Image (tube, grey):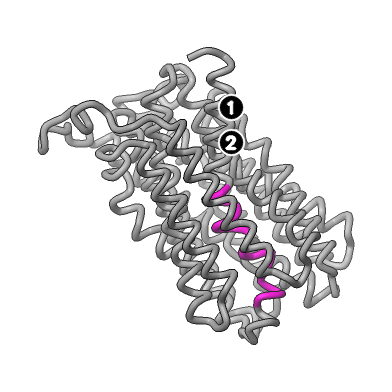
Amino acid sequence: MTRRGVTGFAALGAGLVALGYGLARFAYGLFVPFIRETLGLSPEAVGFIGALTFVSFVATSLFAPFLAERLGARTTAVLASAAALVGLAAIAGARGAGVLALGVGACGVCTGLIMPAMTEAVRASAPSGLHGRLNAVNNAGTSIGVAAAAPAVLAWATDWRSAYTAFAAVALMAAVLAWRHLPGPRPGGNGEAPGTRPALGRDQRHAMATLSVFAFVMGLVSAPYWVFTPDLVTALAGASPRQTALIWLAVGLAGLAGGGTGDIVHRLGAPLTHGAALGLLALALVLIAAAPDNGAVALLSAALFGVAYMTLTGLHVVCGVRILHDRPAAGAVPPFTAIAVGQVCGSSLAGVLIPGFGYAAVFTGFATAGALVCTASALVPERTGHSGLTAQGTG
């Protein structure tokens, strides 16, 4: 693969992930204040509907690696884009909680399919020495999608239906690009007869389980920020659509730093990288809770959250793929499923607690939980008996 080819491939992968994780999944939080007002939803309803994207993501993740391995990156990515198209269009046309929930759930299907599709595409198209870096760059596409949602809310403000209609058009374009440029299935499916795939070793199972526990905690702690931050600054500080858009723009732009996570993990190691990033994520929650009416502090919080979240998710992609080095399409699934389960729990729990305790107390409580887990970061798996996690480019 030439340098130009690598750049184009990375741009396409990041763009598809931007659709799946940015526009289809996390942009929902930015539009929550307007959707809630238009449809007359309670905070509890917002929290539970927001959790549906995580639920459908988890359900899809159970079979997404199989689809990616059997159907290939191209077909799987097209299916992901189609799910996004359906979900985003449903949200745009929602007149009540039911259709909104259906749309949010369909968007989660897209999210569950897109990362296995792209890790399979990396395996099929790129030299092994670039796998870690390309997977981290693909993961950073989330930030591109989040950043793109900010101009959308500035352009359409309370007309969130127009924004989601535009997002649906992007999903249609993504399906076309995926079909034209991503690789098809491997010759002979996955290259193995049914039942011949080697079983995971004990070290692999232990490392993946440990990584997934840390991923769950990260998902739990991050969920209130994604779903309720725009609501928090609107309710506590009277923030305008422009101010909430700037916060999301800061999250997205700062999160682009997560594209270098593969190199950071290689140089600093997974435990140190995890501890520093989770600490920054907890600090971001504390700052926005303490000073929602201070524009500079709010933007600093957003930037810290963007860097921390994308670094942590990048770490889980890189380490997961290296642990399951013989099945890269499945490598990111266990930790990302654990993140989603944590976000289901976190989103729902925050939605229940906020009416009784308030935004500031709930955000601070979640931040405290994250800070406590930082002290256990030395347990983040560094290597397995099959594949050293510090060996750049493996997996």
Answer left or right for 161 relative to 274.
Answer: right
User: In this rendering, is residue 382 above or below 219?
Assistant: above
Q: Which residues are magenta?
A: 19-35
Element under label 2? helix
Q: Residue at x 73, y 47 (%)?
A: 304
Pick the front one: 188 or 288: 188
- How far apart, in angstroms, are the residues tagged by discs 1 and 2? 6 Å
User: In this rendering, is residue 285 above or below 278?
Assistant: below
Residue that label 2 marks: 273
| Residue 332 percent across, percent down from the top left | 41, 41
Could you tell me the amino acid type at mark 1?
Leu
Could you tell me the amino acid type at mark 2?
Thr
Q: Is residue 18 visible?
A: yes
Callout 1–callout 2 Cβ contact below 8 Å: yes
Answer left or right for 78 relative to 233.
Answer: left
Q: Earlier in the sequence, mark 1 or mark 2?
A: 1
Q: Residue at x 61, y 33 (%)?
A: 259
Residue that label 1 marks: 268
Q: Residue at x 57, y 62 (%)?
A: 223
In the figure, residue 6 lies in which quadrant? top right
| Residue 350 percent across, percent down from the top left | 58, 73
